[in-house]
Amino acid sequence: MLRRGNNSQRSTLRTLGVAFAHLAALSAFAVAQPLFDLLGESPEFFAVRGSSRLDIVLFALAVVFVPPAALLAVEALAGLISEQLRQALHLLFVGGLAGVVLVQVLERTTDLSSTRVLLALAALLGAGVALLYRRVPPFRTLLSVLAAAPLAFLIYFLFGSPVSDLTLADDPDVALASVQARAPVVLVVFDEFPVSSLLDRDGEIDAERYPHFAELAEDSTWFRHASTVSYSTTQAVPAILTGVRPEETKPPVFASHPRNLFTLLGGEYRPNVVETFTRLCPEVVCGDSAGGVPGEEPASLYSDAGIVYLHLLAPPRLEEELPPITDRWMNFGREEERAQDLLAEALKEPPRERRRAGERFHDVHTRAYVRFLDGIEPGGGPSLNFVHVFFPHGPWSYFPSGSQSALGPTPVPGRDPGENRWEGRFVTLQAYQRHLLQVGYVDRLIGDLLEHLRDTGMYDRSLVVVTADHGMSFREGVSGRIASQANLEDVAFVPLFVKQPGQERGEVVDHHVETIDVLPTIAEVLGFRIPWRVDGRNALEDPGRGTIRVRTRPEPDAEASAPLAELAPAQEQAVERKVALFGEGAWESLFAAGLHRALLGRRADELAPGSADDRASIDHELTRELLARVEPGLPFVPSPLQGHVEGDGARTGRTLAVAVNGTIAALATIYRASGEQRFSALAPESAFRTGRNTVEFFWVDGAEGAEDLTRLEPG
């Protein structure tokens, strides 16, 4: 009897072992392979959150083995009740995993637009796989052979993909240079910032819109034709910090870039370093405080990876319901949740308390900048102050005043998430508007920096450098960020201001310099030599280069280039285009872009509109909540107003006027997305009043100056 019991246990264990092997094989293709395929090519996902080698290995093991182990555990528990129940569950799991694989296959190989049809077909085929598994022994044998796939995927991810640069590389010894300089260094790197955004039609800084950049230019050397060397933040920022042109893809971590600004000055200078997406400052210099913001716990590596996986798996209509994956690489969806929570909290407080607590409403990137400013202190020896801040990068949710759009980090209409290509003229131009508004907020941040340096008595004796990692383009049908001959003048040219210690007069330099020249220029001003080979030069004395070169892809030699003599006129044309679209000087002209601009500011009841059966609805919950209760001191604005229209008159390209509190405040063009006719109307802050705000929608027909308006029903 004992022998029979042992045999029964061995049989059960063997059965469960085979079941696990089959589940692991299917799970590898359903979960591990697509996730490893994406993240394996994006080591930045791990680098920006400071994941250690052990973190990455444990993550990979969990992705491969936890899903099948969890399913097997359920099976084993069911087997304690009934073997038939266990077998039924096993078939359900086999069919389910097969269905997950098939959803991804169908998305890639078919043009099915209906989510229901896609899911139903995947479920039907998954059920067919389960039936095949039960009735065809060779199929089970095939799965047994494929049981090696999880291990193969795991090994390749850890040791064969670009992630291996993180899992295999040991941190090199930190070689700190010795310098005698004493001047404080302040280096600010903004993100996705074309210098043309600052310029007026004369090629000067638009001092009315951007007064603090104009103030900085008065005391510094402004390199009007400075260019980036890469379209990618994770290449462009290390290039600034090392002075070395990126010729191959490397993770933005110290192990890959051991000779940089922080090792150059870290031996003698007190560090005040806030890195957003890179980890180039070694622990011996910065400790563990260089990345992130105190009190800001990053979302779990696993929760963010889960959101990434759901985006891979979900059909387009369902994907829109997921938290957006942004270029921040982490905390997907958390900022939007935080905005909802803070608004609810703020509405409970009296206005005076709201104003005092305003800093709590800042997003993580503003809090990072505030931390940087607080760390700039006189005394205690020379200081190295560095921040890379995620502005004016999209989703362009800030107004120049510092108020944030209620939309938060939701995806911007018209921007294809794959190639970042712009689709649709109206949504492209509105994104440009929102970008320019957020540049106004960046100007405010520069003002805070200049004020802080003066208040601490550090301004005159500091070396201050302000630049950006790369530019941005807003042209229909063209990628916003990946440089090409169609957008090089937008992506290549970035701001670069260098204020030397004691400098009192500004200078404009028109010869070409590159962001790799920042570090050699710092070294020259401070009076020491860089102890490694750099590609950059001292921008203050260099006669300039003749050709702009920008990396366009991770592959070697993938770059867009053009001579300065050709690209400088193209930049001037880009500025002329911007001014023609959005004016210059006062912000009011920015909101008047587009057709039928004479309608703005007119009372809706004076236009004697008719009515239509079509309906317009505002979709965003936080926007609706704010419209019902705008209060002084609240740092959120219910603009842009986004939603959808329904009815026979709802067609792509039709103009929609939006009245706020009875006055036409914004115009929009209907665009189609995810099977809906949608609108996005950008209204100025001044359109909203304290208390409840009313919003009405009107179709606009007829020629410019002879418009007919038709009122829509509220949704």
Image (cartoon, helix red, strand yellow):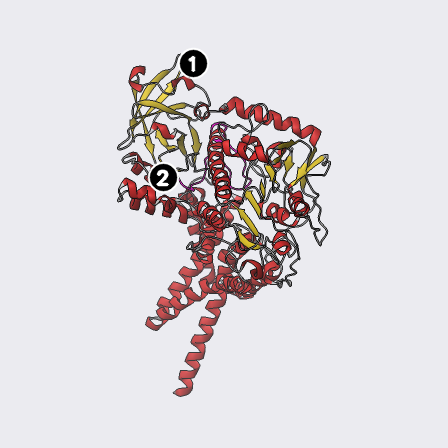
Whole-angstrom CA distance, mark 2 to mark 1, is: 38 Å
Circle 2/circle 1 CB separation < 8 Å: no
Dot 1: within a 10 Å radius of its alpha carbon, few (fewer than 14), some, or many (20 or more) residues?
A: few
Would residue 500 appear left or right of 396 to someone viewing this image? Answer: right
Q: Position of residue 355 (x, y in %)?
A: 33, 41
Which of pointers 2 and 1 indicates the residue nearer the eye?
Answer: 2
Q: Secondary structure at mark 1?
A: loop
| Magenta span | 408-428
Q: Quadrant of the N terminus?
A: bottom left
Q: Is residue 112 above or below residue 706?
A: below
Q: Position of residue 78 (x, y in %)?
A: 35, 68
Q: Which disc is residue 635 wearing?
A: 2
Q: Is residue 706 visible to the viewer in this orientation of the structure?
A: yes
Front-most of 514 and 121? 514
Q: Is residue 538 above or below residue 141?
A: above
Q: Main secondary structure of the magenta part?
A: loop
The quadrant where residue 358 appears = top left
What number of labels is visible?
2
Q: Is residue 649 visible to the viewer in this orientation of the structure?
A: no
Would residue 660 appear left or right of 371 to someone viewing this image? Answer: left
Q: Position of residue 551 (x, y in %)?
A: 65, 42
Residue of label 1: 703
Q: Which disc is residue 309 wearing?
A: none
Amino acid type of disc 1?
Ala
Amino acid type of disc 2?
Pro
Magenta span contains residue 424: yes
Q: Secondary structure at mark 2?
A: loop
Magenta span contains residue 148: no
- Which residue is at the far top? 706
Q: Residue at x 29, y 36 (%)?
A: 631
